[in-house]
Image: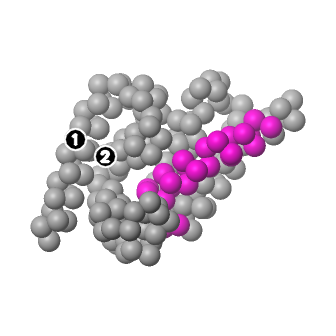
Amino acid sequence: MFANDKKRFTQWVRQYQPFLFRAAWALSGEREIAKDLVQETFALAWRARKQLRDEAATQAWLYRILRREAMRIWREREPWEAWDDAQCAGIAANTQDDTQTDLLNALQALNPLHRDVLVPFYLADMSYEQLAAMLDIPIGTVMSRLSRARRALRQLLEEEKTS
């Protein structure tokens, strides 16, 4: 039994670590905190592995653990400050322009309820159903939060352009 668990856990790390790292970085704003969040997420998942009943829900389950840990860190942390280009370098590796930095700063400035739906929706391509299961809310609520979150993000990005 333990060997099967260890094999499954290794598969989780290989499959979900890139997504969890991107999500942790988007949620925390700092590379080192993101690394710690991912490591802690996998440690907590290992200890609670028997609680996962549906393998299809693994990504949502891991993200829920990550999000809970990120919220714990936010409560202990100093107030958030805008990211600079150096902090965004790893996430923004695909582009060299300021748009990516503006997007990441806007994500950090969003209400946590909005960030909770935007990050997994776009970084993990989670469906409405997966988000509803992960956040333990109805699909209609996911859809309305996502709509409001997109609107809020768009507004923050437009404000950034004009300033």
User: As rendered, which of 98 and 50 lies closer to the eye?
Assistant: 98
Quadrant of residue 51 within the rendered picture: top right
Let me know if residue 18 is in the magenta part: yes
162 lies above or below 2: below
Q: Name the residue rendered at 31%, 68% in the picture.
A: 98
Amino acid type at mark 1: Arg
Residue 54 percent coordinates (x, y)? 62, 24
- Looking at the rendering, the stretch of residues picked out in magenta corresponds to 7-31
Give the quadrant of the C terminus: bottom left
86 lies above or below 52: below
Let me know if residue 92 is in the magenta part: no
Left/right placement of residue 90 relative to residue 45 reads left
Residue 14 percent coordinates (x, y)? 68, 45
Q: Name the residue rendered at 25%, 33% in the picture.
A: 144
Judged from the image, the secondary structure of the residue bearing numbered disc 2 is: helix
Residue 20 percent coordinates (x, y)? 55, 49
> Which residue is denoted by mark 1 in the rendering?
148
Q: Real-space Cα distance between discs 2 and 1?
A: 7 Å
> Which residue is denoted by mark 2 in the rendering?
114
Q: Name the residue rendered at 39%, 63% in the picture.
A: 95
Return the disc, 2 or 1, that comes first in the chain's sequence. Answer: 2
Circles 2 and 1 in contact, beta carbons < 8 Å: yes
Within 10 angstroms of label 2, few (less than 14), some, or many (20 or more) residues? many
Within 10 angstroms of label 1, few (less than 14), some, or many (20 or more) residues? some
Left/right placement of residue 94 relative to residue 49 reads left
Q: Name the residue rendered at 35%, 49% in the picture.
A: 115
Amino acid type at mark 2: His
Quadrant of residue 161 within the rendered picture: bottom left
Q: Is residue 75 visible?
A: no
The prevailing secondary structure element of the residues shown in magenta is: helix
User: As rendered, which of 127 and 133 lies closer to the eye?
Assistant: 127
Give the quadrant of the N terminus: top right
